[in-house]
Image (tube, helix red, strand yellow):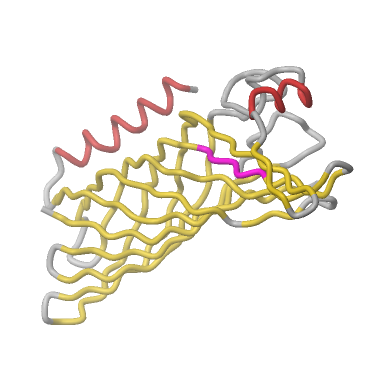
Amino acid sequence: MKKIFLTLTLCSFVGAMFAQGVKYGVTAGLNVSSINISEAEDIDLGYKPGFQAGVVVDWGITQNLSIIPELNFSQKGTKISQQGDEGKLNWNLTLNYLTLPVNLAYKFDLGLDQKLLVFAGPYLGYGLSTSHKIKVKVDGATVNVDTDKYLKEVYGDKNALKFGSKDNQFKRFDFGANVGVGYQYSNILFKLQYNLGLVNIVPDKDENWKNSNFGVTVGYMF
């Protein structure tokens, strides 16, 4: 699977490099993400901030239609709150991905070097690393928890809930869909987009965890 992901990434960018009507750019912005969990009756899920940054290619098929692949470092994850016997546990989970969205975009010419974009397409994600910040609130006081110690006590493995191939780890590969709108003025591009994960990122068949992310980005096309 790793070879397939890298091959698709390479083909997307190499193909665009040799195409006509191609522009290259850089992009960066803010993510607001969560995880849709099927069995989440006793926990509260929230949104967490993160960032994304990368490179983008605009491959113009016609004057109004483009294929736009990107290669980004993207932070996703969620905030989880759960009331326990010893207090309220607050868990900030960050999942760092290398993502490859490939969008088909239609551009409406607004005049004065302005364009309105609507776009949609699939994305691939490859998990790079995870980070956990766990706190427990007891009697109004907040205590930081040693993450490795906590994971070892709960899961029997301090490497649990990281990317890997074990039963208690997250799957590295993610796949989903993008939809969004954008505004382009000259070489500057603003985008608002939503990414919906379609793959269960945990191996447990009794649970279903899928990424969900809103992104606001600004890019510059050279």
- The foreground one among 68 and 79 is 79
Give the residue furthest to the bottom.
Answer: 111
Q: Position of residue 29 (x, y in %)?
A: 34, 55
Residue 71 in the figure: left or right of residue 205: left
Residue at coordinates 45% horizontally, 54% vertically from top-left?
Answer: 31
Q: Is residue 59 left or right of residue 171?
A: left
Picture coordinates of residue 214, whole percent (x, y): 49, 59
Q: Position of residue 157 (x, y in %)?
A: 70, 17
Which of the 4 image quarters holds residue 169?
top right
Residue at 25 percent across and 47 percent down: it is 56
Residue 4 spot, x, y in % from top left: 43, 24
Q: Name which residue lies at 78% across and 51% down.
A: 43
**Residue 15 vs residue 130, the one in the foreground:** 130
How many dots with numbers? 0
Against 203, residue 216 (above or below) is below
Q: Residue at x 14, y 38 (%)?
A: 18
Q: Which residues are magenta?
A: 91-95
| Vertical comparison of 123 with 140: above or below | above
- Residue 99 part of the magenta segment: no
Locate residue 30: give its quadrant.
bottom left
Going by the picture, which residue comes out furthest to the right?
Answer: 85
Of residues 131 and 86, the one nearer the viewer is: 86
Asked if residue 92 is among those painted magenta in the image, a careful observer would answer yes
Q: Main secondary structure of the magenta part?
A: strand
Residue 99, relative to residue 83: is it above or below? above
Q: In the figure, is residue 52 to the left or right of 149?
A: left
